Image (spheres, coloured by chain):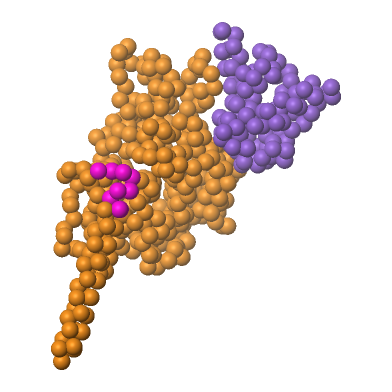
Chain colours: A purple, B orange
């Protein structure tokens, strides 16, 4: 297992990430998680995700791609910050937004 | 001589036969048009056209003329716009062919135009492509708007001045419509309306993408109910369908973007996503109280801010409102069924209207200089000759 794997969303996935589920299209959050993020987490201890360079992100995409890692049991509660490094110079608020979705999912799983 | 009279008689008979045949054909075509969508005649829900308008041998159509209101504006004229659309629908349902008379129209606002556009396309799908048409308005800016946005193209009305007569001050795009989430339409609309001379700062451009992409995602997930379609064929054309329009006016310093779907509306979909008790809590309503449509839209906004234990409920309508927050000015209005919500200038208000708007319409009005993040003076130019 390599220490770090880098994914550039705009270069490796789509410049127009959009939608939540696979049924929303090939550029959805679920497709990104299943095709890129989950395999990268199997290969590397830390996955660095560069969010810059796209047309933008909707909350559905971000929630499904990242908080979806916990729902799909790819990451456990408390693992996200250690295993995923988010980079966004164009819109620094994205990092906090994703962390909020993950925290919300963790709270939901803890409460069960 | 007798042979000549006989030939003349035969000719007259042939012409009479031809005329009878044309009449039968015209009646058959009329019956066929009325059968489209499998609707029965619907009593006196709509006025019936005058028989005197029928002209044998020319067009088989009898048109019911409906005068479009002088002003079509959802702000201040919500009920009138909704009532007019209902009148068109009822007239088609009653078996009439409808011609919209734009002669007296003085002003059409983009929100009302988008609603009309979406509804007209839906009605054409449901009742037949050739049963709805329109006339030309007297006012040039109205004609230019109807032409440039593609409204005339939709109604198969030939544009008199083409779509090229746009001024630099006032720009429109031809309406966009699709049944799937289509990211490239968002960026194309944004880039087309701005042209080569105007540019949005990246963060605002990204927020436009965010707002419309979430609106599209919402439509794809729960905008339409399969039970609401008139037939499987209509469902195939309408399911997931949205419409989008944008204008930019340098004289008024305004950038407008409108997104519409003709689905079941937020007040119907929200109780499917959240328990009614949670909706009441978000609105601080007492147990047992049934929220109205305006309150339902307000609840959809509030629930986006609330952390719930429900799985992946998203941010509700907050992504749509973020555009106003990022620009720091402007107004967003959401119309759904009888509810309307206005968001802007740090305030939010919801109300219930009398008229029923089918589906959900979202309208963003942004001061252009703020959307572009440039000084207002840089946009002041020659007055628009058409406005």
Query: Residue at image x 19%, y 73%?
Result: B16
Residue B41: quadrant of the picture? top left
Residue B330 shows in this picture: no
Q: Residue at x 23, y 64 (%)?
A: B23
Front residue of this view, candidates B354 and B117: B117
Apparent side of residue B39 relative to residue B165 in the rendered image (left or right): left
Quadrant in which the N terminus of chain B is drawn: bottom left
Q: What stretch is highlighted in magenta?
A: B32-40
Taking depth in this image into account, of A39 and A6 the one nearest to the observer is: A39
Q: Where is residue A49 in the image (x, y as percent from the top left)?
A: 72, 30
Residue B17, image quadrant? bottom left
Seen from this angle, which residue lies furthest bottom? Answer: B1
> Would you say residue B38 is visible in this rendering?
yes
Above or below, B113 relative to B141? above
Residue depicted at x 80% and y 24% = A43
Left-right relation of B41 to B359: left
Report the residue that reaches farthest toward the front: B2
Q: Magenta stretch: residue B171 in it?
A: no
| As drawn, B184 above or below A43 | below
Image coords of residue B94 (percent x, y): 23, 46
* Whole-percent x, y for residue A3 in the image: 83, 23
The quadrant in which the C terminus of chain B is found is bottom left
The residue that appears at 58% across and 40% down in the rendered structure is: B206
Q: In this view, does B218 lie to the left or right of A10?
A: left
Expressed as whole percent of the image width and height from the top left, the position of residue B100 reads 27, 56
């Amino acid at each position: 297992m390599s220490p770090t794997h880098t994914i550039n969303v705009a270069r490796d996935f789509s410049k127009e990430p959009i939608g939540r589920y696979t049924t929303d299209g090939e550029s959805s959050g679920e497709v990104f998680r299943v095709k890129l993020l989950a395999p990268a987490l199997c290969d590397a201890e830390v996955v660095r995700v560069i969010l810059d360079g796209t047309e933008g992100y909707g909350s559905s995409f971000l929630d499904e791609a990242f908080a979806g890692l916990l729902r799909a049991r790819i990451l456990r509660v408390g693992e996200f910050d250690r295993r995923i490094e988010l980079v966004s110079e164009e819109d620094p608020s994205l990092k906090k937004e994703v962390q909020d979705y993950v925290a919300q999912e963790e709270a939901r799983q803890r409460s069960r | 001589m007798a042979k000549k009279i006989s030939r003349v008689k035969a000719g007259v008979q042939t012409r009479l036969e031809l005329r009878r045949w044309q009449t039968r054909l015209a009646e058959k075509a009329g019956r066929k048009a009325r059968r489209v969508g499998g609707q029965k005649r619907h009593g006196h829900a709509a006025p019936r056209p005058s028989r005197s308008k029928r002209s044998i041998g020319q067009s088989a159509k009898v048109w019911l003329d409906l005068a479009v209101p002088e002003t079509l504006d959802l702000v201040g004229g919500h009920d009138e716009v909704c009532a007019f659309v209902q009148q068109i629908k009822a007239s088609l349902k009653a078996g009439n062919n409808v011609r919209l008379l734009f002669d007296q129209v003085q002003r059409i606002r983009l929100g009302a135009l988008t609603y009309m556009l979406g509804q007209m396309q839906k009605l054409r799908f449901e009742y037949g492509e050739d049963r709805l048409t329109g006339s030309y308005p007297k006012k040039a800016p109205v004609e230019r708007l109807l032409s440039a946005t593609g409204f005339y193209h939709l109604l198969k009305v030939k544009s008199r001045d083409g779509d090229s007569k746009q001024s630099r001050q006032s720009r429109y795009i031809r309406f966009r419509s699709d049944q799937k989430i289509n990211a490239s339409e968002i960026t194309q609309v944004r880039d087309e309306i701005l042209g080569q001379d105007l540019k949005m700062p990246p963060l605002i451009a990204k927020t436009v993408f965010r707002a419309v992409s979430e609106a599209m995602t919402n439509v794809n997930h729960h905008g339409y109910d399969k039970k609401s379609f008139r037939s499987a064929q209509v469902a195939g054309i309408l399911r997931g369908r949205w419409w989008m329009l944008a204008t930019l006016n340098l004289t008024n310093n305004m950038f407008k973007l409108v997104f519409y779907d003709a689905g079941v509306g937020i007040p119907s979909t929200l109780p499917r996503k959240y328990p009614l008790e949670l909706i009441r809590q978000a609105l601080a309503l007492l147990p047992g109280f049934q929220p109205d449509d305006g309150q339902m839209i307000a609840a959809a906004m509030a629930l986006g801010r609330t952390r719930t234990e429900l799985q992946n409920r998203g941010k509700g309508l907050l992504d749509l409102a973020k555009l106003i927050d990022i620009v720091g000015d402007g107004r967003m209005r959401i119309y759904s069924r009888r509810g309307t919500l206005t968001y802007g200038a740090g305030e939010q208000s919801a109300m219930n209207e009398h008229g029923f708007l089918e589906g959900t319409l979202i309208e963003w009005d942004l001061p252009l200089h703020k959307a572009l993040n440039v000084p207002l003076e840089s946009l002041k130019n020659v007055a628009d000759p058409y406005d």
